[in-house]
Image: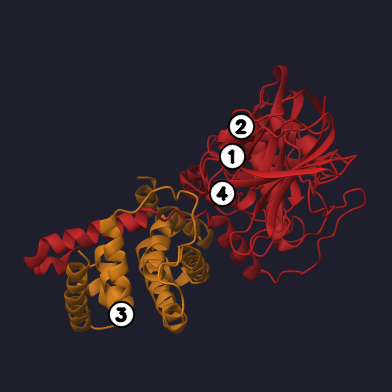
Amino acid sequence: MNDHRDDRRDDSFDELMRRAMSEEAGRIEPADGLHEIQARVRSQRKPVNRRPWVITAGAAMVGTAAAIGAFAVLNDNTKTAEQPSIAGGPDTTSSASAEPTNPPTAPPASPKPTPSDPAASKPPSTLPTSKVRAIEETDLKTPKAVSVYWLGQVVGVKKGPEFRLYRTFNQVTGKPALEALRTMTAPKAANDPDYDSPWSGASVSSVRYTDDLIMVDFERLPNTKLEPEVADMAAQQLVYTVQGALQRTTPVQITQQGRISPDLFGVIDTNSPLSRAQATDVQAMVWITSPENNQTVKQPVTVAGIAAAFEAQVDWRATNVKTKQTVTNYTMTKEGQKFSPFAFTPKLAPGEWLLEVYLTSPEDGRITDTDSKTISVR
Amino acid sequence: MVYEECVAHESSWDADEALTAVYTAHYTSLVRLGALLLRDTGAAEEIVQDAFVAMHGRWHRLRDPHKALAYLRTAVVNRCRSRQRHLVVVDKHLPKSLPDEPSAEHAVMRTAETDRVIEAMRTLPEKQRTVMVLRYYGDLSEAEIADTMGISRGSVKSHAARATKSLRQVLEQST
Protein backbone atom coordinates (compact mmCIF):
# COMPACT_ATOMS: atom_id res chain seq x y z
CA MET A 1 0.00 0.00 0.00
CA ASN A 2 2.73 2.43 0.89
CA ASP A 3 5.29 2.17 -1.81
CA HIS A 4 5.92 5.88 -1.48
CA ARG A 5 7.61 5.01 1.76
CA ASP A 6 10.66 4.01 -0.24
CA ASP A 7 12.05 7.39 0.70
CA ARG A 8 12.06 6.89 4.43
CA ARG A 9 14.50 9.61 5.17
CA ASP A 10 11.92 11.82 6.79
CA ASP A 11 9.66 9.76 8.99
CA SER A 12 8.85 12.60 11.34
CA PHE A 13 7.58 14.72 8.47
CA ASP A 14 5.50 11.79 7.22
CA GLU A 15 4.12 11.30 10.69
CA LEU A 16 3.27 14.96 11.07
CA MET A 17 1.49 15.02 7.72
CA ARG A 18 -0.44 11.86 8.42
CA ARG A 19 -1.47 13.05 11.86
CA ALA A 20 -2.55 16.49 10.67
CA MET A 21 -4.51 15.09 7.74
CA SER A 22 -6.30 12.55 9.80
CA GLU A 23 -7.07 15.05 12.51
CA GLU A 24 -8.38 17.53 9.99
CA ALA A 25 -10.39 14.82 8.25
CA GLY A 26 -11.83 13.71 11.54
CA ARG A 27 -13.42 17.10 12.03
CA ILE A 28 -15.48 16.59 8.93
CA GLU A 29 -18.68 14.72 9.58
CA PRO A 30 -20.75 14.70 6.43
CA ALA A 31 -24.49 14.61 6.75
CA ASP A 32 -26.30 11.59 5.42
CA GLY A 33 -26.24 11.77 1.64
CA LEU A 34 -27.70 8.43 0.66
CA HIS A 35 -31.20 9.76 0.57
CA GLU A 36 -30.20 12.65 -1.66
CA ILE A 37 -28.24 10.38 -3.98
CA GLN A 38 -31.10 7.92 -4.25
CA ALA A 39 -33.50 10.73 -4.98
CA ARG A 40 -31.27 11.98 -7.75
CA VAL A 41 -30.80 8.52 -9.20
CA ARG A 42 -34.55 8.16 -9.16
CA SER A 43 -35.15 11.45 -10.89
CA GLN A 44 -32.60 10.60 -13.58
CA ARG A 45 -34.20 7.27 -14.22
CA LYS A 46 -37.55 8.83 -14.83
CA PRO A 47 -38.18 12.38 -15.99
CA VAL A 48 -39.67 14.16 -13.06
CA ASN A 49 -43.06 15.66 -13.46
CA ARG A 50 -42.45 19.14 -12.13
CA ARG A 51 -45.79 19.80 -10.60
CA PRO A 52 -46.30 22.37 -7.94
CA TRP A 53 -46.99 21.25 -4.45
CA VAL A 54 -50.60 20.25 -4.83
CA ILE A 55 -52.57 20.04 -1.67
CA THR A 56 -56.00 18.66 -1.19
CA ALA A 57 -58.68 20.74 0.46
CA GLY A 58 -58.44 20.95 4.20
CA ALA A 59 -54.74 20.43 4.00
CA ALA A 60 -53.60 23.90 3.10
CA MET A 61 -50.08 24.64 4.15
CA VAL A 62 -50.11 27.98 5.87
CA GLY A 63 -46.95 29.93 5.30
CA THR A 64 -47.00 32.12 8.36
CA ALA A 65 -43.62 33.40 9.26
CA ALA A 66 -43.93 32.41 12.85
CA ALA A 67 -45.53 29.52 14.57
CA ILE A 68 -44.59 26.19 13.24
CA GLY A 69 -45.15 23.07 15.12
CA ALA A 70 -46.23 22.45 18.63
CA PHE A 71 -44.26 19.99 20.62
CA ALA A 72 -45.52 18.63 23.83
CA VAL A 73 -43.02 16.66 25.81
CA LEU A 74 -39.77 15.20 24.74
CA ASN A 75 -39.30 11.65 25.79
CA ASP A 76 -36.76 9.01 24.98
CA ASN A 77 -37.86 8.94 21.39
CA THR A 78 -35.70 11.96 20.85
CA LYS A 79 -32.69 9.74 20.90
CA THR A 80 -33.64 7.82 17.81
CA ALA A 81 -34.29 11.02 15.97
CA GLU A 82 -30.99 12.56 16.89
CA GLN A 83 -28.65 9.71 16.37
CA PRO A 84 -26.99 10.62 13.10
CA SER A 85 -24.80 7.57 13.11
CA ILE A 86 -27.80 5.40 12.47
CA ALA A 87 -28.81 7.21 9.36
CA GLY A 88 -27.96 5.25 6.26
CA GLY A 89 -25.72 3.15 8.42
CA PRO A 90 -25.06 -0.55 8.45
CA ASP A 91 -28.78 -1.19 8.38
CA THR A 92 -29.01 -0.11 4.81
CA THR A 93 -26.08 -2.26 3.89
CA SER A 94 -27.48 -5.39 5.30
CA SER A 95 -30.82 -4.78 3.72
CA ALA A 96 -29.24 -4.00 0.41
CA SER A 97 -27.32 -7.21 0.39
CA ALA A 98 -30.19 -9.32 1.54
CA GLU A 99 -32.85 -8.06 -0.76
CA PRO A 100 -33.22 -8.84 -4.39
CA THR A 101 -34.90 -6.26 -6.55
CA ASN A 102 -38.60 -6.54 -6.55
CA PRO A 103 -40.50 -6.75 -9.77
CA PRO A 104 -43.01 -3.93 -9.80
CA THR A 105 -45.77 -6.20 -10.99
CA ALA A 106 -46.31 -8.57 -8.15
CA PRO A 107 -49.30 -10.48 -6.93
CA PRO A 108 -51.26 -8.72 -4.22
CA ALA A 109 -50.83 -9.97 -0.72
CA SER A 110 -53.61 -10.55 1.68
CA PRO A 111 -53.93 -7.18 3.35
CA LYS A 112 -54.35 -8.45 6.88
CA PRO A 113 -52.22 -11.46 7.61
CA THR A 114 -52.70 -13.15 10.93
CA PRO A 115 -49.51 -14.29 12.60
CA SER A 116 -51.12 -17.56 13.69
CA ASP A 117 -51.81 -18.59 10.13
CA PRO A 118 -48.53 -19.47 8.43
CA ALA A 119 -49.90 -19.19 4.91
CA ALA A 120 -51.27 -15.75 5.48
CA SER A 121 -48.41 -14.39 7.54
CA LYS A 122 -45.85 -15.36 4.99
CA PRO A 123 -44.75 -12.11 3.42
CA PRO A 124 -45.86 -11.70 -0.15
CA SER A 125 -43.30 -12.90 -2.65
CA THR A 126 -42.68 -9.34 -3.71
CA LEU A 127 -41.19 -8.45 -0.39
CA PRO A 128 -37.49 -8.85 0.05
CA THR A 129 -37.43 -10.82 3.25
CA SER A 130 -39.17 -13.97 2.23
CA LYS A 131 -36.72 -15.96 4.33
CA VAL A 132 -37.59 -14.21 7.54
CA ARG A 133 -41.03 -14.13 8.96
CA ALA A 134 -42.33 -10.65 9.55
CA ILE A 135 -44.06 -10.02 12.83
CA GLU A 136 -46.68 -7.56 13.90
CA GLU A 137 -46.43 -5.31 16.91
CA THR A 138 -48.03 -6.41 20.13
CA ASP A 139 -50.96 -4.47 21.49
CA LEU A 140 -50.23 -1.96 24.23
CA LYS A 141 -51.74 -2.75 27.59
CA THR A 142 -51.83 0.89 28.67
CA PRO A 143 -52.02 4.03 26.53
CA LYS A 144 -48.67 5.38 25.46
CA ALA A 145 -47.45 8.61 23.88
CA VAL A 146 -45.93 8.07 20.46
CA SER A 147 -44.24 10.69 18.33
CA VAL A 148 -45.94 11.66 15.10
CA TYR A 149 -44.15 13.83 12.59
CA TRP A 150 -45.63 16.53 10.41
CA LEU A 151 -44.45 18.78 7.63
CA GLY A 152 -44.01 22.42 8.56
CA GLN A 153 -42.88 25.18 6.26
CA VAL A 154 -39.48 26.66 6.94
CA VAL A 155 -39.17 30.40 6.67
CA GLY A 156 -36.32 32.27 5.03
CA VAL A 157 -35.09 29.29 3.04
CA LYS A 158 -32.16 29.99 0.82
CA LYS A 159 -30.84 26.52 0.60
CA GLY A 160 -32.08 23.31 2.06
CA PRO A 161 -35.58 21.96 2.30
CA GLU A 162 -38.61 24.18 2.22
CA PHE A 163 -40.40 21.90 4.62
CA ARG A 164 -39.07 20.18 7.69
CA LEU A 165 -40.37 17.66 10.15
CA TYR A 166 -42.04 18.82 13.33
CA ARG A 167 -43.22 16.44 15.97
CA THR A 168 -46.16 16.03 18.28
CA PHE A 169 -46.77 13.42 20.91
CA ASN A 170 -50.03 11.58 20.73
CA GLN A 171 -51.59 9.14 23.15
CA VAL A 172 -52.44 5.86 21.50
CA THR A 173 -53.71 2.45 22.49
CA GLY A 174 -53.41 -0.76 20.50
CA LYS A 175 -50.48 -1.12 18.12
CA PRO A 176 -48.25 1.95 18.56
CA ALA A 177 -46.72 2.21 15.07
CA LEU A 178 -49.98 1.42 13.32
CA GLU A 179 -51.82 3.96 15.46
CA ALA A 180 -49.11 6.59 14.99
CA LEU A 181 -49.47 6.18 11.23
CA ARG A 182 -53.24 6.31 11.50
CA THR A 183 -52.91 9.62 13.35
CA MET A 184 -50.62 10.84 10.62
CA THR A 185 -52.95 9.77 7.82
CA ALA A 186 -56.22 10.84 9.44
CA PRO A 187 -58.37 12.93 7.08
CA LYS A 188 -58.16 16.02 9.28
CA ALA A 189 -54.78 15.15 10.63
CA ALA A 190 -53.12 17.97 12.53
CA ASN A 191 -55.10 20.30 14.74
CA ASP A 192 -52.48 22.98 14.37
CA PRO A 193 -52.76 25.10 11.24
CA ASP A 194 -48.99 25.36 10.92
CA TYR A 195 -48.25 21.80 10.08
CA ASP A 196 -49.70 19.22 7.87
CA SER A 197 -49.53 15.74 6.47
CA PRO A 198 -49.49 14.94 2.76
CA TRP A 199 -50.44 11.41 3.89
CA SER A 200 -53.79 12.69 5.03
CA GLY A 201 -56.54 10.62 3.52
CA ALA A 202 -54.45 7.50 2.98
CA SER A 203 -55.35 4.36 4.85
CA VAL A 204 -52.83 2.06 6.51
CA SER A 205 -53.66 -1.60 6.80
CA SER A 206 -50.67 -3.13 8.56
CA VAL A 207 -47.21 -2.58 9.98
CA ARG A 208 -44.93 -5.59 10.23
CA TYR A 209 -41.22 -5.95 10.65
CA THR A 210 -38.30 -8.33 10.44
CA ASP A 211 -34.81 -7.89 11.80
CA ASP A 212 -33.80 -5.69 8.93
CA LEU A 213 -36.92 -4.28 7.40
CA ILE A 214 -40.13 -2.55 8.40
CA MET A 215 -43.08 -3.16 6.10
CA VAL A 216 -45.95 -0.75 5.95
CA ASP A 217 -48.86 -1.88 3.84
CA PHE A 218 -51.52 0.59 2.80
CA GLU A 219 -55.06 -0.18 1.84
CA ARG A 220 -54.85 3.04 -0.13
CA LEU A 221 -51.84 5.27 -0.66
CA PRO A 222 -52.31 9.03 -0.90
CA ASN A 223 -52.91 10.13 -4.47
CA THR A 224 -51.48 13.60 -3.93
CA LYS A 225 -48.78 14.66 -6.38
CA LEU A 226 -45.83 16.46 -4.83
CA GLU A 227 -42.65 18.20 -5.84
CA PRO A 228 -39.79 15.69 -5.56
CA GLU A 229 -38.21 17.42 -2.56
CA VAL A 230 -41.50 17.64 -0.73
CA ALA A 231 -42.26 14.03 -1.61
CA ASP A 232 -38.94 12.99 -0.12
CA MET A 233 -39.70 14.92 3.05
CA ALA A 234 -43.14 13.30 3.22
CA ALA A 235 -41.47 9.91 2.86
CA GLN A 236 -39.18 10.81 5.76
CA GLN A 237 -42.24 11.86 7.75
CA LEU A 238 -43.49 8.30 7.50
CA VAL A 239 -40.05 6.80 8.11
CA TYR A 240 -39.50 8.88 11.25
CA THR A 241 -42.99 8.23 12.59
CA VAL A 242 -42.96 4.48 12.12
CA GLN A 243 -39.36 4.05 13.25
CA GLY A 244 -40.00 6.18 16.33
CA ALA A 245 -43.01 4.13 17.33
CA LEU A 246 -41.24 0.83 16.74
CA GLN A 247 -37.94 2.06 18.21
CA ARG A 248 -36.16 0.56 15.23
CA THR A 249 -34.14 2.32 12.54
CA THR A 250 -34.27 -0.30 9.82
CA PRO A 251 -35.41 0.76 6.32
CA VAL A 252 -39.09 1.01 5.55
CA GLN A 253 -40.77 -0.79 2.67
CA ILE A 254 -44.06 0.77 1.59
CA THR A 255 -46.66 -1.22 -0.31
CA GLN A 256 -50.25 -0.77 -1.35
CA GLN A 257 -52.25 -3.97 -0.92
CA GLY A 258 -48.96 -5.84 -1.06
CA ARG A 259 -47.85 -4.20 -4.29
CA ILE A 260 -44.99 -1.83 -4.82
CA SER A 261 -45.98 1.58 -6.02
CA PRO A 262 -43.98 3.11 -8.86
CA ASP A 263 -45.13 6.63 -8.19
CA LEU A 264 -45.88 7.45 -4.59
CA PHE A 265 -46.72 11.18 -4.54
CA GLY A 266 -46.15 11.02 -8.27
CA VAL A 267 -42.38 10.66 -7.94
CA ILE A 268 -41.18 8.01 -5.47
CA ASP A 269 -40.63 4.46 -6.63
CA THR A 270 -41.13 2.27 -3.57
CA ASN A 271 -39.28 -0.56 -5.28
CA SER A 272 -36.49 -0.23 -2.74
CA PRO A 273 -37.02 0.43 0.95
CA LEU A 274 -36.65 3.96 2.27
CA SER A 275 -33.82 4.65 4.64
CA ARG A 276 -33.76 7.25 7.32
CA ALA A 277 -32.31 10.64 6.47
CA GLN A 278 -30.13 12.39 8.99
CA ALA A 279 -31.95 14.45 11.58
CA THR A 280 -30.18 17.69 10.67
CA ASP A 281 -31.39 17.32 7.09
CA VAL A 282 -35.04 16.81 7.86
CA GLN A 283 -35.90 17.86 11.38
CA ALA A 284 -36.99 21.36 12.29
CA MET A 285 -34.06 23.35 13.63
CA VAL A 286 -35.78 24.92 16.60
CA TRP A 287 -38.83 24.16 18.64
CA ILE A 288 -40.35 24.79 22.04
CA THR A 289 -40.94 21.69 24.10
CA SER A 290 -42.52 23.46 27.04
CA PRO A 291 -44.94 25.14 27.69
CA GLU A 292 -47.54 23.71 25.36
CA ASN A 293 -49.67 25.78 23.08
CA ASN A 294 -52.56 27.47 24.94
CA GLN A 295 -51.20 26.39 28.30
CA THR A 296 -51.77 28.51 31.40
CA VAL A 297 -48.57 28.97 33.35
CA LYS A 298 -47.61 30.59 36.61
CA GLN A 299 -44.76 33.04 37.16
CA PRO A 300 -41.92 32.58 36.68
CA VAL A 301 -42.34 31.18 33.19
CA THR A 302 -39.66 28.80 32.05
CA VAL A 303 -39.51 28.11 28.35
CA ALA A 304 -37.59 25.05 27.25
CA GLY A 305 -36.83 23.69 23.82
CA ILE A 306 -34.41 22.10 21.43
CA ALA A 307 -32.46 23.77 18.67
CA ALA A 308 -29.60 23.18 16.34
CA ALA A 309 -28.28 26.70 16.26
CA PHE A 310 -25.23 28.32 14.76
CA GLU A 311 -23.00 29.30 17.65
CA ALA A 312 -25.72 28.02 19.96
CA GLN A 313 -27.75 31.21 19.84
CA VAL A 314 -31.53 31.09 19.95
CA ASP A 315 -33.37 34.41 19.80
CA TRP A 316 -36.74 34.80 21.41
CA ARG A 317 -39.52 37.31 21.49
CA ALA A 318 -42.59 37.51 23.67
CA THR A 319 -45.48 39.68 22.50
CA ASN A 320 -48.36 40.57 24.76
CA VAL A 321 -51.43 39.72 22.72
CA LYS A 322 -53.44 42.66 24.10
CA THR A 323 -50.96 45.45 24.67
CA LYS A 324 -48.54 44.42 21.92
CA GLN A 325 -45.73 45.01 24.38
CA THR A 326 -42.72 42.97 23.30
CA VAL A 327 -39.80 41.54 25.19
CA THR A 328 -36.87 40.24 23.17
CA ASN A 329 -33.67 38.59 24.17
CA TYR A 330 -31.63 35.56 23.30
CA THR A 331 -30.50 32.38 24.98
CA MET A 332 -27.92 29.74 24.29
CA THR A 333 -28.28 26.04 23.69
CA LYS A 334 -26.00 23.77 25.63
CA GLU A 335 -23.95 23.04 22.53
CA GLY A 336 -23.83 24.74 19.15
CA GLN A 337 -24.40 23.24 15.68
CA LYS A 338 -26.23 20.15 16.86
CA PHE A 339 -29.61 19.45 18.39
CA SER A 340 -29.22 20.61 21.93
CA PRO A 341 -31.55 21.85 24.68
CA PHE A 342 -32.12 25.47 25.67
CA ALA A 343 -34.17 27.16 28.38
CA PHE A 344 -34.90 30.72 29.43
CA THR A 345 -37.08 32.53 31.93
CA PRO A 346 -38.70 35.62 30.47
CA LYS A 347 -40.23 38.15 32.86
CA LEU A 348 -43.82 38.31 31.71
CA ALA A 349 -46.67 40.17 33.37
CA PRO A 350 -49.96 38.31 33.74
CA GLY A 351 -51.85 38.11 30.47
CA GLU A 352 -51.80 36.32 27.17
CA TRP A 353 -48.46 36.17 25.37
CA LEU A 354 -47.26 34.97 22.01
CA LEU A 355 -43.93 33.34 22.56
CA GLU A 356 -41.64 32.94 19.56
CA VAL A 357 -38.20 31.42 19.28
CA TYR A 358 -36.19 31.81 16.13
CA LEU A 359 -32.80 31.29 14.58
CA THR A 360 -31.09 33.90 12.50
CA SER A 361 -28.78 33.38 9.60
CA PRO A 362 -25.12 34.03 10.41
CA GLU A 363 -24.73 35.37 6.86
CA ASP A 364 -27.24 38.16 6.77
CA GLY A 365 -29.37 38.06 9.89
CA ARG A 366 -32.46 36.68 8.19
CA ILE A 367 -34.80 34.72 10.42
CA THR A 368 -34.44 31.15 9.26
CA ASP A 369 -36.34 28.91 11.64
CA THR A 370 -39.12 29.54 14.08
CA ASP A 371 -41.52 28.01 16.52
CA SER A 372 -44.17 29.70 18.60
CA LYS A 373 -46.67 29.10 21.38
CA THR A 374 -49.46 31.18 22.77
CA ILE A 375 -49.49 31.01 26.54
CA SER A 376 -51.48 32.56 29.29
CA VAL A 377 -49.51 33.86 32.28
CA ARG A 378 -51.22 34.10 35.64
CA MET B 1 -17.09 -6.22 8.61
CA VAL B 2 -20.42 -6.29 6.88
CA TYR B 3 -19.08 -4.62 3.77
CA GLU B 4 -16.38 -7.22 3.27
CA GLU B 5 -18.93 -9.99 3.56
CA CYS B 6 -21.03 -8.22 1.02
CA VAL B 7 -18.14 -8.07 -1.41
CA ALA B 8 -18.34 -11.84 -1.60
CA HIS B 9 -21.78 -11.51 -3.13
CA GLU B 10 -20.90 -8.55 -5.26
CA SER B 11 -21.61 -10.22 -8.58
CA SER B 12 -25.28 -10.43 -7.71
CA TRP B 13 -25.53 -6.75 -6.84
CA ASP B 14 -27.61 -4.51 -8.96
CA ALA B 15 -26.84 -0.81 -9.20
CA ASP B 16 -29.11 0.14 -6.28
CA GLU B 17 -27.59 -2.43 -3.94
CA ALA B 18 -24.08 -1.47 -4.97
CA LEU B 19 -24.90 2.17 -4.36
CA THR B 20 -26.07 1.50 -0.82
CA ALA B 21 -23.18 -0.78 0.05
CA VAL B 22 -20.42 1.38 -1.43
CA TYR B 23 -22.04 4.44 0.09
CA THR B 24 -22.03 2.91 3.54
CA ALA B 25 -18.42 1.88 3.28
CA HIS B 26 -16.89 4.92 1.60
CA TYR B 27 -19.10 7.97 1.63
CA THR B 28 -17.60 9.58 4.71
CA SER B 29 -14.00 9.06 3.70
CA LEU B 30 -14.66 10.39 0.20
CA VAL B 31 -16.30 13.53 1.56
CA ARG B 32 -13.35 13.99 3.87
CA LEU B 33 -10.98 13.57 0.96
CA GLY B 34 -12.92 16.17 -1.01
CA ALA B 35 -13.08 18.52 1.95
CA LEU B 36 -9.32 18.30 2.46
CA LEU B 37 -8.81 19.21 -1.18
CA LEU B 38 -11.35 22.01 -1.24
CA ARG B 39 -11.61 23.16 2.38
CA ASP B 40 -15.34 23.29 1.88
CA THR B 41 -17.39 20.45 3.29
CA GLY B 42 -20.60 21.50 1.57
CA ALA B 43 -18.96 21.54 -1.84
CA ALA B 44 -17.25 18.22 -1.10
CA GLU B 45 -20.57 16.62 -0.24
CA GLU B 46 -22.05 17.86 -3.49
CA ILE B 47 -19.15 16.55 -5.51
CA VAL B 48 -19.17 13.15 -3.83
CA GLN B 49 -22.90 12.84 -4.34
CA ASP B 50 -22.44 13.66 -8.03
CA ALA B 51 -19.81 10.94 -8.20
CA PHE B 52 -22.14 8.41 -6.60
CA VAL B 53 -24.91 9.26 -9.02
CA ALA B 54 -22.45 8.76 -11.88
CA MET B 55 -21.24 5.48 -10.40
CA HIS B 56 -24.79 4.22 -10.16
CA GLY B 57 -25.31 5.01 -13.82
CA ARG B 58 -22.32 2.98 -14.94
CA TRP B 59 -22.55 0.12 -12.47
CA HIS B 60 -23.24 -2.31 -15.32
CA ARG B 61 -19.72 -1.60 -16.52
CA LEU B 62 -17.99 -1.47 -13.14
CA ARG B 63 -19.61 -4.53 -11.58
CA ASP B 64 -17.04 -4.60 -8.81
CA PRO B 65 -16.92 -2.60 -5.57
CA HIS B 66 -13.15 -2.18 -5.78
CA LYS B 67 -13.36 -0.76 -9.26
CA ALA B 68 -16.26 1.34 -8.08
CA LEU B 69 -14.15 2.83 -5.32
CA ALA B 70 -11.32 3.63 -7.73
CA TYR B 71 -13.86 5.19 -10.06
CA LEU B 72 -15.36 7.27 -7.26
CA ARG B 73 -11.98 8.41 -6.03
CA THR B 74 -10.94 9.50 -9.50
CA ALA B 75 -14.26 11.25 -10.08
CA VAL B 76 -14.04 13.08 -6.76
CA VAL B 77 -10.42 14.13 -7.25
CA ASN B 78 -11.05 15.33 -10.80
CA ARG B 79 -14.12 17.28 -9.83
CA CYS B 80 -12.37 18.84 -6.86
CA ARG B 81 -9.42 19.79 -8.98
CA SER B 82 -11.47 21.44 -11.65
CA ARG B 83 -13.47 23.26 -9.01
CA GLN B 84 -10.30 24.38 -7.30
CA ARG B 85 -8.95 25.80 -10.52
CA HIS B 86 -12.10 27.89 -10.85
CA LEU B 87 -11.79 29.02 -7.29
CA VAL B 88 -8.18 30.14 -7.40
CA VAL B 89 -9.00 33.63 -8.58
CA VAL B 90 -11.87 34.06 -6.16
CA ASP B 91 -9.86 32.67 -3.29
CA LYS B 92 -7.26 35.39 -3.50
CA HIS B 93 -9.86 37.97 -2.67
CA LEU B 94 -11.27 36.16 0.31
CA PRO B 95 -10.24 36.70 3.93
CA LYS B 96 -7.52 34.32 4.81
CA SER B 97 -9.16 32.06 7.33
CA LEU B 98 -12.53 31.52 5.77
CA PRO B 99 -14.35 29.24 8.17
CA ASP B 100 -15.32 25.87 6.84
CA GLU B 101 -18.95 24.99 6.59
CA PRO B 102 -19.96 24.33 10.18
CA SER B 103 -20.75 20.67 10.61
CA ALA B 104 -22.91 19.01 13.17
CA GLU B 105 -20.06 17.37 15.04
CA HIS B 106 -17.92 20.37 14.99
CA ALA B 107 -16.97 20.84 18.61
CA VAL B 108 -13.54 19.30 18.09
CA MET B 109 -10.84 21.92 18.12
CA ARG B 110 -7.90 21.63 15.85
CA THR B 111 -4.53 21.52 17.42
CA ALA B 112 -2.10 24.27 16.56
CA GLU B 113 0.06 21.74 14.79
CA THR B 114 -2.72 20.65 12.47
CA ASP B 115 -3.60 24.26 11.88
CA ARG B 116 -0.09 25.00 10.74
CA VAL B 117 0.02 22.03 8.40
CA ILE B 118 -3.37 22.79 6.89
CA GLU B 119 -2.47 26.45 6.43
CA ALA B 120 0.84 25.46 4.87
CA MET B 121 -0.98 23.12 2.50
CA ARG B 122 -2.92 26.08 1.19
CA THR B 123 0.26 27.63 -0.10
CA LEU B 124 0.91 24.68 -2.42
CA PRO B 125 -0.06 24.62 -6.07
CA GLU B 126 -3.14 22.53 -6.72
CA LYS B 127 -1.36 19.45 -8.12
CA GLN B 128 1.13 19.26 -5.30
CA ARG B 129 -1.56 19.61 -2.71
CA THR B 130 -3.66 16.89 -4.33
CA VAL B 131 -0.70 14.53 -4.34
CA MET B 132 -0.05 15.22 -0.66
CA VAL B 133 -3.67 14.67 0.36
CA LEU B 134 -3.89 11.41 -1.57
CA ARG B 135 -0.62 10.26 -0.11
CA TYR B 136 -1.15 11.14 3.51
CA TYR B 137 -4.88 11.03 3.93
CA GLY B 138 -5.75 8.54 1.19
CA ASP B 139 -2.69 6.44 2.00
CA LEU B 140 -2.35 5.68 -1.70
CA SER B 141 0.75 4.39 -3.40
CA GLU B 142 2.53 6.37 -6.07
CA ALA B 143 0.97 4.17 -8.74
CA GLU B 144 -2.50 4.67 -7.32
CA ILE B 145 -2.02 8.42 -7.11
CA ALA B 146 -0.81 8.45 -10.70
CA ASP B 147 -3.90 6.52 -11.83
CA THR B 148 -6.25 8.68 -9.85
CA MET B 149 -4.84 11.94 -11.14
CA GLY B 150 -4.12 10.72 -14.64
CA ILE B 151 -0.45 11.67 -14.49
CA SER B 152 2.74 9.61 -14.64
CA ARG B 153 4.44 8.10 -11.62
CA GLY B 154 7.40 10.31 -12.30
CA SER B 155 5.25 13.40 -12.01
CA VAL B 156 3.77 12.13 -8.77
CA LYS B 157 7.26 11.74 -7.41
CA SER B 158 8.35 15.20 -8.44
CA HIS B 159 5.18 16.89 -7.21
CA ALA B 160 5.60 15.11 -3.89
CA ALA B 161 9.23 16.12 -3.61
CA ARG B 162 8.52 19.75 -4.38
CA ALA B 163 5.57 19.84 -2.04
CA THR B 164 7.59 18.29 0.76
CA LYS B 165 10.33 20.81 0.29
CA SER B 166 8.11 23.86 0.39
CA LEU B 167 5.96 22.52 3.22
CA ARG B 168 9.00 22.00 5.36
CA GLN B 169 10.16 25.51 4.65
CA VAL B 170 6.80 27.02 5.51
CA LEU B 171 6.46 24.92 8.62
CA GLU B 172 9.91 25.83 9.85
CA GLN B 173 9.15 29.52 9.36
CA SER B 174 5.88 29.31 11.23
CA THR B 175 7.33 27.63 14.32
Distance, label 2 to label 1, CA atoms, is 7 Å
Q: Colour of chain A?
A: red
Residue to which mark 4 is pinned: A278
Residue lying farthest top? A141
Q: Chain of mark 3?
A: B
- The shade of chain B is orange
| Residue with the most extreme right position | A57
**Circle 4: element type:** loop
Whole-angstrom CA distance, mark 4 to mark 2, is 15 Å
Residue at x-position 17% and y-position 71%: B168
Name the residue furthest left.
A9
Which of disc 1 and disc 4 is earlier in sequence?
1
- Residue under pointer 2: A77
What secondary structure is marked by label 3? helix
Same chain? Circles 3 and 1? no
**For this rendering, which residue is in front, B109 or A353?**
A353
Q: Disc 4 sits on a residue from what chain?
A: A
Circle 2 residues within 10 Å: few <14, some 14–19, many ≥20: some
Helix, strand or loop under label 1: helix
Q: Up-down: is B149 above or below B104?
A: below
Residue holding disc 3? B127
Q: Position of residue A240 (x, y in %)?
A: 65, 41
Marker disc for residue A81: 1
